[in-house]
Image (spheres, rainbow, N blue to C red):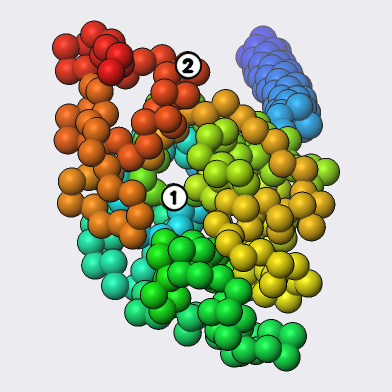
Amino acid sequence: MILLSSHRAKKKVGSWRNEMAFFVVGVLVVSLLSQLLTLNEFISQESKQDQANDAFIMKSNPLAMHATGEQTLQPVPNPNRTLAIIMGSLRGGEISWQTMASNVLDPSSADLAILIPEDDINAMNSSLYKRAKYKWTFKNYEDWGEAVDLINGTEWNGTGWRKLALEDYDNSASVFGGVEDYSGSGAIIFMIRWFLHNHIKENNLTEKYDHFMVTRSDHYYQCTHNISEFSVGNRNLWIPPGQDYKGRTDRHLIAGSDNVLDALDVFPTFMRSNWVRKKKRMNTEKLLSRVWEEKKMNVNYFDRVMFTTALPTDTTRWTYAEDHVPGVPGLLLKYPVEYGMVQDVCPQIKGDDGKEEDTEE
Protein backbone atom coordinates (compact mmCIF):
# COMPACT_ATOMS: atom_id res chain seq x y z
CA MET A 1 0.00 0.00 0.00
CA ILE A 2 2.82 2.32 0.87
CA LEU A 3 4.51 1.59 -2.48
CA LEU A 4 1.30 2.16 -4.40
CA SER A 5 0.74 5.53 -2.71
CA SER A 6 4.30 6.58 -3.52
CA HIS A 7 3.83 5.69 -7.19
CA ARG A 8 0.62 7.66 -7.43
CA ALA A 9 2.31 10.72 -5.88
CA LYS A 10 5.15 10.60 -8.38
CA LYS A 11 2.63 10.34 -11.24
CA LYS A 12 0.79 13.49 -10.04
CA VAL A 13 4.06 15.45 -9.79
CA GLY A 14 5.03 14.46 -13.38
CA SER A 15 1.64 15.53 -14.73
CA TRP A 16 1.90 18.89 -12.92
CA ARG A 17 5.35 19.50 -14.38
CA ASN A 18 4.06 18.78 -17.91
CA GLU A 19 1.16 21.18 -17.45
CA MET A 20 3.55 23.88 -16.18
CA ALA A 21 5.83 23.36 -19.20
CA PHE A 22 2.93 23.69 -21.63
CA PHE A 23 1.79 26.82 -19.79
CA VAL A 24 5.22 28.46 -19.96
CA VAL A 25 5.58 27.64 -23.65
CA GLY A 26 2.13 29.10 -24.31
CA VAL A 27 3.00 32.30 -22.50
CA LEU A 28 6.22 32.61 -24.48
CA VAL A 29 4.41 32.04 -27.79
CA VAL A 30 1.76 34.65 -26.95
CA SER A 31 4.47 37.12 -25.92
CA LEU A 32 6.44 36.54 -29.15
CA LEU A 33 3.33 36.94 -31.29
CA SER A 34 2.50 40.18 -29.48
CA GLN A 35 5.99 41.53 -30.13
CA LEU A 36 5.80 40.55 -33.80
CA LEU A 37 2.48 42.32 -34.18
CA THR A 38 3.87 45.44 -32.51
CA LEU A 39 6.95 45.40 -34.80
CA ASN A 40 4.81 44.97 -37.90
CA GLU A 41 2.63 47.92 -36.87
CA PHE A 42 5.77 50.05 -36.29
CA ILE A 43 7.17 49.17 -39.72
CA SER A 44 3.82 49.99 -41.32
CA GLN A 45 3.73 53.39 -39.59
CA GLU A 46 7.31 54.12 -40.74
CA SER A 47 6.40 53.25 -44.32
CA LYS A 48 3.40 55.58 -44.22
CA GLN A 49 5.58 58.37 -42.83
CA ASP A 50 8.16 57.87 -45.59
CA GLN A 51 5.44 58.08 -48.21
CA ALA A 52 4.12 61.26 -46.61
CA ASN A 53 7.63 62.74 -46.56
CA ASP A 54 8.16 61.87 -50.24
CA ALA A 55 4.82 63.44 -51.12
CA PHE A 56 5.81 66.61 -49.26
CA ILE A 57 9.13 66.77 -51.11
CA MET A 58 7.41 66.34 -54.47
CA LYS A 59 4.89 69.05 -53.62
CA SER A 60 7.29 71.58 -52.13
CA ASN A 61 10.16 71.20 -54.61
CA PRO A 62 9.53 72.59 -58.13
CA LEU A 63 12.17 70.21 -59.43
CA ALA A 64 10.62 66.75 -59.64
CA MET A 65 12.44 64.45 -57.20
CA HIS A 66 12.78 60.78 -57.76
CA ALA A 67 14.70 57.90 -56.17
CA THR A 68 17.59 56.42 -58.12
CA GLY A 69 19.24 53.55 -56.32
CA GLU A 70 19.31 53.32 -52.54
CA GLN A 71 18.16 56.39 -50.63
CA THR A 72 19.30 58.76 -53.46
CA LEU A 73 17.21 61.73 -54.56
CA GLN A 74 18.18 63.61 -57.72
CA PRO A 75 16.47 66.61 -59.34
CA VAL A 76 15.17 66.29 -62.88
CA PRO A 77 16.57 69.42 -64.57
CA ASN A 78 14.24 71.77 -66.41
CA PRO A 79 15.19 72.28 -70.07
CA ASN A 80 17.01 75.50 -70.91
CA ARG A 81 14.59 78.13 -72.19
CA THR A 82 17.24 80.50 -73.58
CA LEU A 83 19.09 80.08 -76.88
CA ALA A 84 22.19 82.03 -77.89
CA ILE A 85 22.92 81.99 -81.62
CA ILE A 86 26.21 82.88 -83.31
CA MET A 87 26.12 83.70 -87.02
CA GLY A 88 28.94 83.94 -89.53
CA SER A 89 32.59 82.99 -89.52
CA LEU A 90 34.12 82.28 -86.12
CA ARG A 91 36.42 85.20 -85.30
CA GLY A 92 37.89 86.75 -82.18
CA GLY A 93 39.60 83.61 -80.91
CA GLU A 94 39.31 81.53 -77.75
CA ILE A 95 40.01 84.47 -75.46
CA SER A 96 36.82 86.19 -76.63
CA TRP A 97 34.84 82.95 -76.82
CA GLN A 98 35.63 82.08 -73.22
CA THR A 99 34.09 85.37 -72.10
CA MET A 100 30.90 84.40 -73.89
CA ALA A 101 30.87 81.10 -72.03
CA SER A 102 31.53 82.58 -68.58
CA ASN A 103 29.60 85.86 -68.87
CA VAL A 104 26.71 84.91 -71.17
CA LEU A 105 25.99 81.21 -71.61
CA ASP A 106 26.60 80.08 -68.03
CA PRO A 107 24.73 82.91 -66.22
CA SER A 108 21.84 82.59 -68.68
CA SER A 109 21.71 78.77 -68.54
CA ALA A 110 21.58 79.07 -72.31
CA ASP A 111 21.90 76.52 -75.08
CA LEU A 112 24.13 77.49 -77.99
CA ALA A 113 23.53 77.33 -81.74
CA ILE A 114 26.01 78.24 -84.46
CA LEU A 115 25.40 79.04 -88.13
CA ILE A 116 28.75 79.12 -89.92
CA PRO A 117 30.14 78.84 -93.46
CA GLU A 118 30.47 75.26 -94.63
CA ASP A 119 34.09 75.92 -95.60
CA ASP A 120 35.13 77.16 -92.13
CA ILE A 121 37.49 74.22 -91.62
CA ASN A 122 38.88 75.47 -88.31
CA ALA A 123 35.49 75.81 -86.63
CA MET A 124 35.29 72.20 -85.45
CA ASN A 125 38.33 72.71 -83.20
CA SER A 126 36.76 75.65 -81.39
CA SER A 127 35.18 75.59 -77.95
CA LEU A 128 32.05 77.17 -79.46
CA TYR A 129 31.57 74.31 -81.90
CA LYS A 130 32.07 71.71 -79.20
CA ARG A 131 29.59 73.41 -76.89
CA ALA A 132 26.90 74.07 -79.52
CA LYS A 133 23.69 72.06 -79.30
CA TYR A 134 22.69 73.07 -82.82
CA LYS A 135 25.24 73.22 -85.65
CA TRP A 136 24.16 74.62 -89.02
CA THR A 137 26.13 75.68 -92.08
CA PHE A 138 25.57 77.81 -95.16
CA LYS A 139 27.23 78.06 -98.55
CA ASN A 140 29.83 80.81 -98.82
CA TYR A 141 28.74 82.32 -102.14
CA GLU A 142 31.11 84.04 -104.50
CA ASP A 143 28.16 86.21 -105.56
CA TRP A 144 25.56 86.48 -102.79
CA GLY A 145 22.99 87.48 -105.38
CA GLU A 146 22.59 83.73 -105.96
CA ALA A 147 21.54 83.42 -102.33
CA VAL A 148 19.03 86.26 -102.69
CA ASP A 149 17.50 84.36 -105.61
CA LEU A 150 16.60 81.58 -103.16
CA ILE A 151 13.99 83.77 -101.46
CA ASN A 152 11.69 84.53 -104.37
CA GLY A 153 13.58 83.83 -107.55
CA THR A 154 15.02 86.64 -109.65
CA GLU A 155 11.95 88.92 -109.66
CA TRP A 156 10.17 90.97 -106.99
CA ASN A 157 6.91 92.76 -107.75
CA GLY A 158 7.35 91.96 -111.43
CA THR A 159 10.81 93.51 -111.59
CA GLY A 160 14.16 91.77 -111.67
CA TRP A 161 15.69 92.65 -108.31
CA ARG A 162 19.19 92.92 -109.75
CA LYS A 163 17.99 95.53 -112.25
CA LEU A 164 16.25 97.36 -109.42
CA ALA A 165 19.41 97.36 -107.35
CA LEU A 166 21.68 98.47 -110.14
CA GLU A 167 19.35 101.30 -111.17
CA ASP A 168 18.43 102.64 -107.75
CA TYR A 169 21.53 101.97 -105.65
CA ASP A 170 25.14 102.78 -106.45
CA ASN A 171 27.77 100.28 -105.40
CA SER A 172 28.48 102.15 -102.17
CA ALA A 173 25.10 101.04 -100.79
CA SER A 174 26.28 98.48 -98.24
CA VAL A 175 22.82 96.93 -98.02
CA PHE A 176 23.74 94.97 -101.17
CA GLY A 177 27.28 94.20 -100.03
CA GLY A 178 28.35 90.79 -101.31
CA VAL A 179 26.30 91.04 -104.53
CA GLU A 180 28.50 91.45 -107.60
CA ASP A 181 30.74 94.48 -107.00
CA TYR A 182 28.82 96.08 -104.12
CA SER A 183 30.99 96.94 -101.13
CA GLY A 184 30.34 95.85 -97.56
CA SER A 185 28.44 92.81 -96.41
CA GLY A 186 24.76 93.79 -96.19
CA ALA A 187 23.38 91.07 -98.47
CA ILE A 188 25.56 88.53 -96.68
CA ILE A 189 24.41 89.29 -93.13
CA PHE A 190 20.76 89.55 -94.11
CA MET A 191 20.80 86.32 -96.09
CA ILE A 192 22.45 84.56 -93.15
CA ARG A 193 19.52 85.88 -91.10
CA TRP A 194 17.15 84.38 -93.66
CA PHE A 195 18.92 81.02 -93.33
CA LEU A 196 18.68 81.31 -89.54
CA HIS A 197 14.99 82.21 -89.76
CA ASN A 198 14.40 78.97 -91.65
CA HIS A 199 16.38 76.84 -89.18
CA ILE A 200 14.47 78.23 -86.20
CA LYS A 201 11.17 77.60 -87.94
CA GLU A 202 12.04 74.11 -89.19
CA ASN A 203 13.22 73.03 -85.73
CA ASN A 204 10.20 74.58 -83.98
CA LEU A 205 12.57 76.43 -81.65
CA THR A 206 10.08 79.16 -80.76
CA GLU A 207 8.18 76.45 -78.87
CA LYS A 208 11.32 75.29 -77.05
CA TYR A 209 12.84 78.65 -76.05
CA ASP A 210 11.55 81.93 -74.61
CA HIS A 211 14.66 84.11 -75.08
CA PHE A 212 16.85 84.34 -78.18
CA MET A 213 20.17 86.12 -78.58
CA VAL A 214 21.43 86.59 -82.14
CA THR A 215 25.00 87.77 -82.27
CA ARG A 216 28.48 87.36 -83.73
CA SER A 217 31.42 85.39 -82.40
CA ASP A 218 33.99 88.16 -82.02
CA HIS A 219 32.51 89.95 -79.00
CA TYR A 220 34.51 90.19 -75.79
CA TYR A 221 32.04 90.23 -72.87
CA GLN A 222 33.75 92.19 -70.13
CA CYS A 223 31.00 91.53 -67.56
CA THR A 224 27.84 89.47 -67.14
CA HIS A 225 25.19 89.51 -69.86
CA ASN A 226 22.24 87.42 -68.64
CA ILE A 227 19.93 87.00 -71.60
CA SER A 228 17.19 85.31 -69.60
CA GLU A 229 16.59 88.44 -67.49
CA PHE A 230 15.45 90.61 -70.40
CA SER A 231 11.77 91.40 -70.84
CA VAL A 232 10.97 90.12 -74.31
CA GLY A 233 7.18 90.27 -74.28
CA ASN A 234 5.16 92.94 -76.08
CA ARG A 235 7.38 92.56 -79.19
CA ASN A 236 10.39 93.95 -77.33
CA LEU A 237 13.80 93.88 -78.99
CA TRP A 238 17.02 94.70 -77.13
CA ILE A 239 20.22 95.99 -78.71
CA PRO A 240 23.36 97.67 -77.36
CA PRO A 241 23.96 101.39 -77.94
CA GLY A 242 26.57 102.67 -80.36
CA GLN A 243 27.45 101.92 -83.98
CA ASP A 244 23.90 102.70 -85.12
CA TYR A 245 24.88 104.79 -88.17
CA LYS A 246 21.49 106.56 -88.15
CA GLY A 247 19.64 103.26 -87.80
CA ARG A 248 19.88 100.18 -85.54
CA THR A 249 23.01 98.15 -84.96
CA ASP A 250 23.09 94.77 -86.72
CA ARG A 251 25.71 93.18 -84.44
CA HIS A 252 23.66 91.96 -81.49
CA LEU A 253 19.99 91.32 -80.78
CA ILE A 254 17.85 89.88 -77.99
CA ALA A 255 14.28 88.86 -78.86
CA GLY A 256 11.48 86.64 -77.63
CA SER A 257 9.76 83.63 -79.11
CA ASP A 258 6.90 85.82 -80.35
CA ASN A 259 9.00 88.15 -82.48
CA VAL A 260 12.41 86.60 -83.24
CA LEU A 261 11.26 85.33 -86.65
CA ASP A 262 9.91 88.76 -87.61
CA ALA A 263 13.13 90.40 -86.40
CA LEU A 264 15.16 88.17 -88.74
CA ASP A 265 12.81 88.59 -91.73
CA VAL A 266 14.69 91.55 -93.17
CA PHE A 267 15.53 91.04 -96.85
CA PRO A 268 12.15 89.55 -97.88
CA THR A 269 10.40 92.53 -96.25
CA PHE A 270 12.81 94.91 -97.94
CA MET A 271 12.40 93.44 -101.41
CA ARG A 272 8.59 93.29 -101.43
CA SER A 273 8.02 96.69 -99.83
CA ASN A 274 6.72 99.79 -101.61
CA TRP A 275 9.56 101.91 -100.25
CA VAL A 276 12.36 99.78 -101.61
CA ARG A 277 12.87 102.09 -104.62
CA LYS A 278 12.66 105.33 -102.65
CA LYS A 279 16.04 104.98 -100.96
CA LYS A 280 18.92 105.84 -103.25
CA ARG A 281 21.42 104.84 -100.61
CA MET A 282 20.88 102.43 -97.78
CA ASN A 283 23.11 100.88 -95.16
CA THR A 284 22.32 97.83 -93.06
CA GLU A 285 21.54 99.83 -89.94
CA LYS A 286 18.98 102.04 -91.70
CA LEU A 287 17.39 98.99 -93.29
CA LEU A 288 17.00 97.25 -89.93
CA SER A 289 15.43 100.36 -88.44
CA ARG A 290 12.97 100.66 -91.31
CA VAL A 291 11.97 97.00 -91.28
CA TRP A 292 11.54 96.84 -87.50
CA GLU A 293 9.46 100.01 -87.62
CA GLU A 294 7.21 98.49 -90.25
CA LYS A 295 6.84 95.33 -88.13
CA LYS A 296 5.98 97.46 -85.06
CA MET A 297 8.85 96.24 -82.94
CA ASN A 298 9.59 97.96 -79.62
CA VAL A 299 13.34 98.56 -79.75
CA ASN A 300 15.11 99.04 -76.40
CA TYR A 301 18.73 99.64 -75.44
CA PHE A 302 20.72 97.94 -72.68
CA ASP A 303 24.05 99.02 -71.22
CA ARG A 304 26.81 97.77 -73.49
CA VAL A 305 28.92 95.06 -71.86
CA MET A 306 30.74 93.77 -74.95
CA PHE A 307 33.08 95.12 -77.62
CA THR A 308 34.14 93.71 -80.99
CA THR A 309 37.58 92.12 -81.25
CA ALA A 310 39.83 90.43 -83.78
CA LEU A 311 42.90 88.27 -84.01
CA PRO A 312 45.73 89.41 -86.29
CA THR A 313 44.88 86.44 -88.54
CA ASP A 314 41.14 87.17 -88.83
CA THR A 315 39.76 88.12 -92.25
CA THR A 316 37.08 90.76 -92.82
CA ARG A 317 35.19 92.54 -95.61
CA TRP A 318 34.95 95.78 -93.69
CA THR A 319 36.96 97.32 -90.82
CA TYR A 320 40.43 96.03 -89.93
CA ALA A 321 41.45 96.08 -86.28
CA GLU A 322 44.62 97.93 -85.33
CA ASP A 323 44.47 98.83 -81.63
CA HIS A 324 45.36 96.31 -78.93
CA VAL A 325 42.89 95.46 -76.17
CA PRO A 326 44.47 96.69 -72.88
CA GLY A 327 45.21 93.79 -70.57
CA VAL A 328 44.53 91.10 -73.20
CA PRO A 329 47.74 90.24 -75.09
CA GLY A 330 47.28 89.22 -78.70
CA LEU A 331 43.72 90.55 -79.01
CA LEU A 332 42.88 93.52 -81.23
CA LEU A 333 40.12 96.09 -80.86
CA LYS A 334 37.91 96.83 -83.88
CA TYR A 335 35.77 99.73 -82.66
CA PRO A 336 37.25 101.90 -79.89
CA VAL A 337 33.90 103.63 -79.32
CA GLU A 338 32.39 100.30 -78.22
CA TYR A 339 35.30 99.66 -75.86
CA GLY A 340 34.93 103.09 -74.27
CA MET A 341 31.23 102.54 -73.56
CA VAL A 342 31.94 99.18 -71.91
CA GLN A 343 34.49 100.73 -69.54
CA ASP A 344 31.70 102.94 -68.15
CA VAL A 345 29.69 99.85 -67.20
CA CYS A 346 32.00 96.93 -66.40
CA PRO A 347 34.94 96.47 -64.01
CA GLN A 348 38.18 97.07 -65.82
CA ILE A 349 40.15 94.18 -67.26
CA LYS A 350 43.02 93.10 -65.05
CA GLY A 351 46.42 92.41 -66.58
CA ASP A 352 48.64 89.43 -65.92
CA ASP A 353 49.91 91.11 -62.75
CA GLY A 354 46.37 91.35 -61.36
CA LYS A 355 46.30 95.13 -61.65
CA GLU A 356 43.63 97.05 -63.57
CA GLU A 357 44.90 98.22 -66.94
CA ASP A 358 45.15 101.92 -67.73
CA THR A 359 42.61 102.50 -70.52
CA GLU A 360 43.58 106.09 -71.22
CA GLU A 361 44.69 106.55 -74.81
Q: Provide residue 219's location: percent of width, then percent of height.
A: 39, 40
Camera-nearest residue between 20 and 144 = 144
- Could you tell me the amino acid type at mark 1? Arg
Q: Which residue is mark 2?
A: 344
The answer to whether residue 98 is seen in the rendering is: no
Q: Provide residue 282's location: percent of width, then percent of height.
A: 58, 60
Q: Is residue 145 above or below residue 54?
A: below
Left or right: where does residue 163 sit relative to residue 122? right
In this rendering, the label closer to the viewer, 2 or 1: 2
Tell me which residue sits at (30%, 35%) in the image.
333
Picture mark count: 2
- Could you tell me the amino acid type at mark 2? Asp
The answer to whether residue 358 is seen in the rendering is: yes
Q: Is residue 179 above or below residue 184?
A: below
Tell me which residue sits at (41%, 23%) in the image.
340
Q: Quadrant of the C terminus?
A: top left
Left or right: where does residue 300 sit relative to residue 82? right
Q: Provide residue 46's location: percent of width, then percent of height.
A: 71, 25
Q: CA distance from mark 2 to mark 1?
A: 22 Å
Question: Which mark is on residue 216?
Answer: 1
Helix, strand or loop at mark 2: loop
Q: Provide residue 99's location: percent of width, then percent of height.
A: 37, 34
Left or right: where does residue 34 sit relative to residue 25? right
Tell me which residue sits at (71%, 58%) in the image.
291
Mark 1, residues whose alpha carbon is within 10 Å: few (<14), some, or many (≥20)?
Answer: many
Mark 2, residues whose alpha carbon is within 10 Å: few (<14), some, or many (≥20)?
Answer: few
Camera-nearest residue between 151 and 106 = 151
Tell me which residue sits at (41%, 14%) in the image.
347
Left or right: where does residue 231 sit relative to residue 327? right
